[in-house]
Amino acid sequence: QVQLVESGGGLVQAGGSLILSCATSGRTFSTYAMGWFRQAPGKERTFVAAIWWSDGSTYYADSVKDRFTISRDNAKNTVYLQMNTLKPEDTAVYYCASRWHSGSLWIADEYDYWGQGTQVTVSL
């Protein structure tokens, strides 16, 4: 089993920055990749970014490319999401997730474990 705990959400003005953290515990040595997803009110959960645990390769949704950066600290078993130039449309609950197998990293149903989510609100 793996436990994920997100932190770092909050209220920020458009154009500002936030960094989200996802601390993992439990059977983390089996992690293949980790991802960040977000869900706005009344909308489906959508992919934001993912990182391969072994070599740190990354993959982003087009909507956040060049603004968000996903990274990991293997020693701390923590994944980060640096979010810059935030826009009101980035407002959502952000979730981190982990998976033990390869596949389509942008598909939420393929992830094995999820955190509880952290709210990010971007105001005008």
Image (cartoon, rainbow, N blue to C red):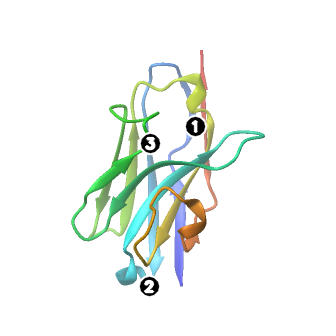
Give the image location of residue 19, x and y in percent.
42, 42
Q: Tag 1, which secondary structure?
A: strand
The crowding category of the residue bearing disc 2, from other C-alpha atoms within 10 Å (few below 14, some 14 to 19, many at least 20), is few
Q: Tag 2, which secondary structure?
A: loop
> In which quadrant of the rendered image does the C terminus lie?
top right
Q: CA distance from mark 1 to mark 3?
A: 22 Å
The mark that comes first in sequence, 1 or 3, is: 1
Indicate whether 66 appears above or below 35: above
Q: Disc 2 residue type?
A: Arg
Give the image location of residue 90, x and y in percent.
56, 32
Q: Tag 3, which secondary structure?
A: loop
The numbered dot on residue 10 is 1
The numbered dot on residue 61 is 3
Classify residue 43 by image quadrant: top right
Foreground disc of the pair 2, 3: 3
Which is more toward the observer, 120 or 8? 120
Q: Looking at this rendering, what residue extends furthest in the front direction?
A: 104
Q: Disc 3 residue type?
A: Ala
Q: Looking at this rendering, what residue extends furthest in the top direction?
A: 124
> In which quadrant of the rendered image does the N terminus lie?
bottom right
Q: Please say if the residues under marks 1 and 3 sit with CB atoms less than 8 Å apart.
A: no
Q: Disc 1 residue type?
A: Gly
The crowding category of the residue bearing disc 3, from other C-alpha atoms within 10 Å (few below 14, some 14 to 19, many at least 20), is some
Indicate whether 79 appears above or below 53: above
The numbered dot on residue 27 is 2
Which is more toward the observer, 58 or 3? 58
Give the image location of residue 50, x and y in percent.
40, 55
Give the image location of residue 97, x and y in percent.
52, 64
The mark that comes first in sequence, 2 or 3, is: 2
Q: CA distance from mark 2 to mark 3?
A: 28 Å
